[in-house]
Amino acid sequence: MKIRHILLVTVTTGLLAGAAYVMYQLGKHEGMQNSLSDKNTSLQDTGASKKALYWHDPMVPGQKFDKPGKSPFMDMQLVPVYADNADTASENSVSINPRIQQNLAIRTASVVVGKLNAVVQTVGSVAYNERDVAVLQARSNGFVEKLYVRAPLDLVRKGQPLAELYVPDWIAAQEEFLAVKRMQGQAIVGLLDAARQRMRLAGMTDEQIHTVESIGKLHARITITAPLSGVMTELSVREGMTVSMGTPMFRINGVDTIWVNADIPESMAHTVQAGNMIEARTVSLPGVVFHGKVATMLPQVDSNTRTVKARIELVNPGSPGAQLLPGMFTTLNFAGTARKESLLVPSEALISTGVRNVVILAQDDGRFLPVNVEVGAESNDQTEIIRGLQAGQKVVASGQFLIDSEASLKASITRMEGATSAISTPSLNLPATAPAGVKQ
């Protein structure tokens, strides 16, 4: 009896345990089914309110898919992009909290329509005006008896004596002329003309010939005078030297007008033309402004500096002791040619990569989008936009590099969010074996 009682208790206990386990599994299965049903209902509701435009892999945002599934690039599920947040999910845009924008000191500027004030600023060097030059040569063979200018770079005035030459060849020509003049008769008219011509060939001027004819005496010496006021840039003779016909003796550069040779960047050369007015300043004359114009644009580009030479002509006050001297550096402001209206943005808003030019476009709700633009001329911290923007849009003028750094993290963040939302639901399979004491 005792053994039978023990067996009965054991069997009863096993049956109760098996029933309890079965009830537990059924309740768990039903609860999970209800949970899945609620979740599917929620997803259906969400899907009804949001329309997926496409699916993409956040790590390869340029590739779009028309249905969900596993990414062919990464071991993860594709992430949907809905119609109401397509801009936010765009791989090119970045959303930044307004408080963070303030911390980053992000400043925006509007795209405006206006005329670019094409003012070119550059430097130039002062040089002599090569069109205002006088070169004096010996007209006959002779000797330098007196020299009134002793050193190069001496200042001379127009009409000032420079040197006195003794010319022996003039004596024979003048004696022949005076002998013919003392003759009588009609035939001397032709002889006089021939004698005058020989004096001209000897190097005498008409004024010197008239002097000999009026005073009736030999004039074997000539005084060379300065034909213009300026600087004696070359002095090739000294007292006692013998000079022959055609020997260069003096070179005088006028300083009433002066040249300034300016280097214009090749990219801005089209804004400067002959006739443009300029203002010139030099540190040696503080507060003095020189006004002039571009005489010509030299048809040559410097291969080392990539600049075009502009030749500027300035009036040089204070001649012959001029204010502007060759070798001085000047600061030049060019008034460029008038330009048509165009879109303008601050030059600091541009991000130049060497291959393309990019601006960060500020959108609504704190979103920022990089935009490729085609730029034109640049002046006074403003850049002309040829293509890529519209008037009234706002671009980031300060902090755009921080936004670019923020954008580089977007793919990683989107991938993390996509991986979290793509976790698959585990399958609900009942155990294959029943617990101890339960018949299968």
Image (cartoon, grey):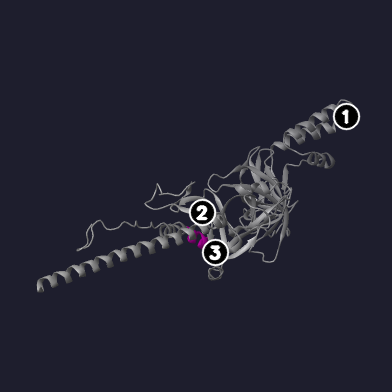
Residue 90 showing in the rendered view: no
Picture disc at residue 399: 3
Label 2 to label 1, Cα distance in Å? 123 Å
Q: Which residue is located at x 54 percent, y 58 percent?
A: 88
Q: Nearer the viewer, residue 9 or 40?
A: 9
Judged left or right of residue 108, residue 187 is: right
Q: Amino acid at mark 1?
A: Gln
Q: Indicate the quadrant containing the C terminus: top left, top right, bottom left or bottom right.
A: bottom left
Picture disc at residue 222: none
Q: Which residue is mark 1?
A: 184
Q: Which residue is mark 2?
A: 81
Q: Amino acid at mark 2?
A: Val
> For the residue labelled by badge 2, is the local secondary structure a helix, a strand or a loop?
strand
Q: Which residues are magenta?
A: 398-407
The answer to whether the residues at label 2 and label 3 have Cβ atoms under 8 Å apart is no
- At label 3, counting other C-alpha atoms closer than 10 Å, the crowd grade (few under 14, some 14-19, many 20 or more) is some
Judged left or right of residue 160, residue 377 is: left
Q: Nearer the viewer, mark 3 or mark 1?
A: 3
Does label 2 or label 3 sit earlier along the sequence?
Answer: 2
Q: Amino acid at mark 3?
A: Gly
